[in-house]
Image (cartoon, rainbow, N blue to C red):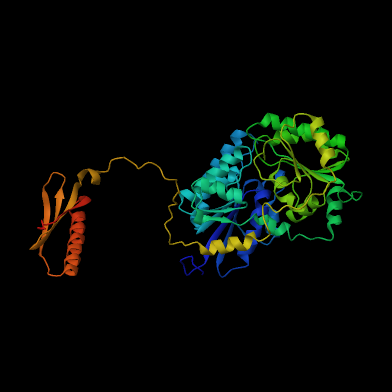
Amino acid sequence: MEKNGNNRKLRVCVATCNRADYSKLAPIMFGIKTEPAFFELDVVVLGSHLIDDYGNTYRMIEQDDFDINTRLHTIVRGEDEAAMVESVGLALVKLPDVLNRLKPDIMIVHGDRFDALALATSAALMNIRILHIEGGEVSGTIDDSIRHAITKLAHYHVCCTRSAEQHLISMCEDHDRILLAGCPSYDKLLSAKNKDYMSIIRMWLGDDVKCKDYIVALQHPVTTDIKHSIKMFELTLDALISFNKRTLVLFPNIDAGSKEMVRVMRKKGIEHHPNFRAVKHVPFDQFIQLVAHAGCMIGNSSCGVREVGAFGTPVINLGTRQIGRETGENVLHVRDADTQDKILQALHLQFGKQYPCSKIYGDGNAVPRILKFLKSIDLQEPLQKKFCFPPVKENISQDIDHILETLSALAVDLGGTNLRVAIVSMKGEIVKKYTQFNPKTYEERISLILQMCVEAAAEAVKLNCRILGVAQAFPQVAV
């Protein structure tokens, strides 16, 4: 069992909340499944996976031949801020029973979703070790706060970029518990070769569509500025209608504001427009092929600035949702997407280009590194995590042991006849005295005086005396 301190398998619980996090967690789950001698895998499914309006995406987990140990219905519908808070609360109510039953050694949590915050909070309070995937990154909305909150709860961290690693260290996380592995989804992206990709394109966009002659659109609400994000989505759809290219539009996630965005789609007749295909979910293997061969991707999904770079597909990143992300040269930012014309100009600039493939977020070898990291976890180590704070001014708070101890010094008398050592208080009072006959040779004297000092120092601890220094007295020698 490498060095995890046990003679048993490591019980790993992977909790997945939505289609996006499953694309990152699935490669790790497959890796764990291939090593049954080391790991036991429990899969917990919650969040939007279990909602029909969002595609019942738990089915793709079953299709991947994973046994779902627990299904938790944790979403309170409403798609507003209050519903998000209530969903976190509902998850916190339901998760303790599940974790008590499964008793995992470690829980793997991904990313920055509100569901993931509930998972990390539950595991931390129930003394379960947490491995957080994709910590240390910066995007541009409430997700940042949630991501960093999970980092503080997590015991171990798997990050994707060197910058993310440095952010974690700056956040006082223990460098020994940080693994720079790359993004697990890149293991699949960089090995994705499908000669029959045209059949996938035709299935989702129609028989008359050509490679590099269509757009993939994926836009989510920005929970810190819902009204503006809805307006921006409306402008995006207007620009896409004017651009007049076949477009695959994926429904937004379940964040606050998504219901209003769906209303905008229906108001503009997107689901029935001849140039648009509106879908709730595309299986990840097929989605890879669709974005790899698209003329352009547009929206504000992290997928656009992270995964799509692996193929060099042009991306238009709208608004502030991903403003802090590291991106390749394939990404054109329209941070202030306040007019239809500005978005339309970006489409004209980007559509049909081909950029160099980017490996900012991974080299295709993340999963082997993560499995090795999991095997190295020592369950005998203390559960309480420690933070690596920078040096600060010494704490001057009072402690009863310091108040009660006696400030003292060792007094050493190198007499001609006897050697003496004493513990003497700052008031000049002798607490304890040691006397030995002075040996004849120099070596014997030095050895004996050192032995007496060590004995006195040890006794000082028992007597609650703090030794602040040593004073020596020498006999006068006539010259």
Q: Nearer the viewer, residue 358 or 307?
A: 358
On screen, residue 398 versus residue 16, left or right, reads left
Q: Residue furthest left?
A: 417
Residue 376 is left or right of residue 277, and the answer is left
**Residue at (80% x, 37% y) in the render:** 346
- Quarter-of-image position of residue 382: bottom left
Measured as percent of width and height from the top left, residue 93 is found at 51, 45
The answer to whether 107 is drawn above or below residue 172 in the figure is below
Q: Position of residue 253 (x, y in %)?
A: 69, 42
Relative depth, front residue between 344 and 475: 475
Most foreground residue, 68 or 462: 462
Which of the image's four quarters has the C terminus? bottom left
Indicate the position of residue 95 as horizontal and vertical percent values: 53, 49
Q: Is there any visible trace of residue 358 in the rendered image?
A: yes
User: Which residue is found at the position 44% from the left and 51% from the top?
Assistant: 386
Residue at left offset 65%, top offset 31%: 225
The residue lying toward the viewer, choosing from 428 and 419, is 419
Tell me residue 87's x, y (percent): 58, 41
Q: Residue furthest right?
A: 208
Q: How many marks?
A: 0
| Residue 93 visible in the shown view | no
Residue found at x 75% / y 34%: 233
Q: Is residue 169 shown left or right of residue 161?
A: left
